[in-house]
């Protein structure tokens, strides 16, 4: 018997079929999505997206990629925090983008946020064109994740940040098992009743439960070539903010023949301790926020 190409909770056996089923599912629940998001997270999702946008730190007039933008709550928050930026809001479920467009692209936002239907595994964007990238509750849905990381890496400018907001692994007990009960029983029940889609909120619970923990995700980002990877737990680790940077100096494929090429980065000269402290003060981008944990290299 041939092994299925992917481990999809949609029941799909190929990545292409998985993508199609996920896009259809989000298309079906687009009308209820915002309401259920706020209700099921007790309004916490607004704060999580605020933290995600805050971590992105694009150039003041840069373009930010918001992948899996859905109804564009993150895109709107990015523009609120960085009014000089433009946002490329990409998602492959058109009804999600259309819903967000009608509700949120008003008051001049429509001239700075650009919704585009696209698959995160093949971005219609030029190399090194994005000043930062975000993805909120989207990476869990993309298979294989490596394809999305490679695309993020390709389109980001050197030194730019990739910021991921995603649930932690639901396989850890949180709040003495209360959260796990919520995930297993309440979430699918409430989701079924309100959205009228018996599958969508079961899919949500299943994908959270089987999602890798924060350390494993950080290691995936390192393997994809990113550096300065760290994570910040939010709400007791129910959600994590992951931050990664594309190295400033990437090795060009045209290096002289026989040259020793390190995996992705040219190591920088180490600054003397005093100089490094001064540099860190001037450049807070390199500082980890309170509570943040670095990811160990494997
Ligand atoms: C849970 S929603 C998140 C929406 C939004 N980021 C938010 O914070 O509310 C996940 C979104 O990811 C999108 N998505 C999943 N896989 C994708 C892919 N391969 N390419 C583009 N979008 C994808 C879905 O269509 C859906 O709109």
Image (spheres, grey):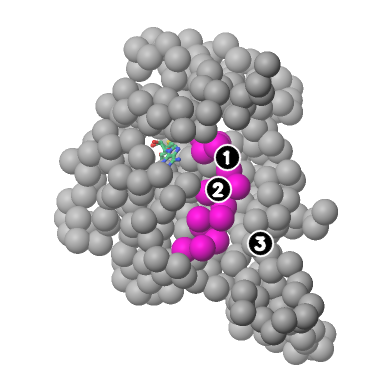
Asked if residue 173 can be seen in this view, the reply is yes
In the image, ligand 1 is in what quadrant? top left
Mark 1 crowdedness (10 Å alpha carbons): few <14, some 14-19, many ≥20: some
Asked if residue 57 can be seen in this view, the reply is no
User: Which residue appears at 46% of the width and 27% of the height?
Assistant: 17
Query: Whole-Å distance between the Cαs marked 2 and 1?
Result: 6 Å
Q: Earlier in the sequence, mark 3 or mark 2?
A: 2
Relative vertical location of residue 142 with respect to residue 193 in this rendering, above or below: below
Q: Quadrant of the N terminus?
A: top right
Measured from the top left, where is residue 144 in percent x and y? 58, 40
User: Which residue appears at 82% of the width and 54% of the height?
Assistant: 298
Judge by depth and name the residue closer to the eye, 150 or 274: 150
Judge by depth and name the residue closer to the eye, 72 or 251: 251
**In this figure, which residue is indicated by the disc labeled 3?**
225
Measured from the top left, where is residue 247 in percent x and y? 63, 71
Query: Whole-Å distance between the Cαs marked 3 and 1?
Result: 16 Å
Question: Which stretch appears magenta?
Answer: 140-155
**In this figure, which residue is indicated by the disc labeled 2?**
147
User: Which residue appears at 75% of the width and 89% of the height?
Assistant: 275
Judged left or right of residue 242, residue 17 is left
Query: Whole-Å distance between the Cαs marked 3 and 2?
Result: 13 Å
> At numbered mark 2, what does the secondary structure look like: helix, strand or loop?
helix
**In this figure, which residue is indicated by the disc labeled 1?**
144
Judge by depth and name the residue closer to the eye, 110 or 173: 110
């Amino acid at each position: 018997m041939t092994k299925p190409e992917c481990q999809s909770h949609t029941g799909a056996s190929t990545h292409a079929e998985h993508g199609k089923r996920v896009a259809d599912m989000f298309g079906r629940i687009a009308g209820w999505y915002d309401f259920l998001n706020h209700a099921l997270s007790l309004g916490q999702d607004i704060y999580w997206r605020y933290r995600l946008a805050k971590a992105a730190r694009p150039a003041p007039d840069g373009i930010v990629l918001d992948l899996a933008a859905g109804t564009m709550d993150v895109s709107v928050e990015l523009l609120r925090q960085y009014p000089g930026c433009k946002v490329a809001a990409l998602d492959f479920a058109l009804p999600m983008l259309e819903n967000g467009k009608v509700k949120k692209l008003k008051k001049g936002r429509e001239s700075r946020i650009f919704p585009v239907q696209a698959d995160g595994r093949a971005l219609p964007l030029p190399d090194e064109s994005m000043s930062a990238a975000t993805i909120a509750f989207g990476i869990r849905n993309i298979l294989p994740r490596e394809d999305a990381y490679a695309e993020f890496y390709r389109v980001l400018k050197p030194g730019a940040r990739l910021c991921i907001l995603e649930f932690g692994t639901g396989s850890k007990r949180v709040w003495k098992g209360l959260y796990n009960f919520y995930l297993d029983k309440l979430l699918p029940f409430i989701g079924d009743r309100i959205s009228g889609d018996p599958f969508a909120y079961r899919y949500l619970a299943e994908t959270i439960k089987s999602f890798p923990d924060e350390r494993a995700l950080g290691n995936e980002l390192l393997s994809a070539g990113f550096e300065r990877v760290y994570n910040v737990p939010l709400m007791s680790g129910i959600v994590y903010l992951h931050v990664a940077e594309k190295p400033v100096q990437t090795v060009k494929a045209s290096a002289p023949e026989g040259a020793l090429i390190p995996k992705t980065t040219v190591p920088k000269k180490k600054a003397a301790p005093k100089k490094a402290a001064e540099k860190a003060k001037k450049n807070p981008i390199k500082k980890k926020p309170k509570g943040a944990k670095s990811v160990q290299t494997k």
